[in-house]
Image (cartoon, grey):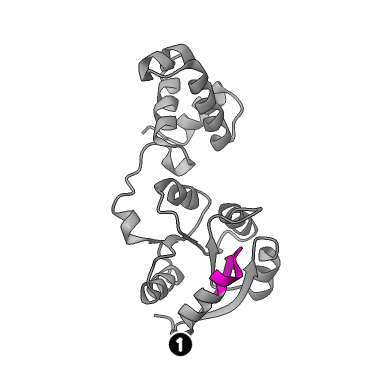
Amino acid sequence: MSSEPVRIVLVDDHEMVIEGLKAMLAAFADRVCVVGQSVGADQVMGVVTDLDPDIVLCDVRMQGSSGLDVCQQLRRRDPDRKIVMLSVYDDEQYLFQAMRVGASGYLLKSISSEDLVEQLESVHSGKTAIDPTMAARAVEWPGARQGLTQRESEILALVVNGLSNRAIAAKLIIGDETVKTHLSSIYRKLGVSDRTAAVATALREGIFQ
């Protein structure tokens, strides 16, 4: 454990949640110290730049920019910035998306104050913090870290194997339009615009290795 308290900035679009977290952490002032806060995403960049905290504890879903967007922006500005996502959503997809944009942790808001402090100290020491209830069932599928759902992963695998939309639809017993919808989502998540680029990205990043 560090001799100095871990310096935290809190980010949530509900001030009541921020005040609740501050009260929750107040009993551990010798271990963690809330040095600043941002209600919503608008002020985050300025607050973090000014205060340079050890960890940014950020809600996943907020009005306007999401916590995932905030994480990506902060990491783009400072690749060493530690951001821990705090959420009510125990959905593995959010977890994988958070890891993909460089988060150092994903914790649920139901976490106890003692556990939260321990996880923050763990992240400060260089480890990744994942809520134990999620880590136990967060089984990765190919493409999960790129944000793909399991169905999208199945479809991308078939695309890589050279199947047409019609063949994919027949194999998975879904409609052609459903395949097109999934492909559009896959392209967006991989940052590509067509089938060939999606295959190239899948191969380059070793998604199915």
The residue that appears at 61% across and 63% down in the rendered structure is: 13
Quadrant in which residue 154 is drawn? top left
Q: In this view, does 14 lie to the left or right of 205?
A: right
Quadrant in which residue 130 is drawn? bottom left
Count of numbered circles in the view: 1
Give the residue number, with chain letter if any, for mark 1: 30
The residue that appears at 50% across and 80% down in the rendered structure is: 23
Residue 129 spot, x, y in % from top left: 40, 63
Q: Is residue 101 above or below residue 185?
A: below
Q: Which amino acid does label 1 sit on?
A: Asp
- Is residue 9 visible in the rendered image? The answer is no
Residues shaded magenta: 7-18
Residue 94 spot, x, y in % from top left: 46, 49
- Is residue 133 visible in the rendered image? The answer is yes
Q: Is residue 133 above or below residue 144?
A: below
Dot 1: what SS?
loop
Quadrant in which residue 54 is drawn? bottom right
Query: Does the magenta segment cover residue 14?
Result: yes
Residue 63 spot, x, y in % from top left: 63, 55
Q: In which quarter of the image is the N terminus?
A: bottom left
Q: Is residue 105 above or below residue 191?
A: below
Query: Does the magenta segment cover residue 91?
Result: no
Residue furthest left in the image: 136
Residue 88 spot, x, y in % from top left: 45, 58
Q: How crowded is mark 1: few (under 14 residues within 10 Å), some or many (20 or more)?
A: few
Q: Quadrant of the C terminus?
A: top left
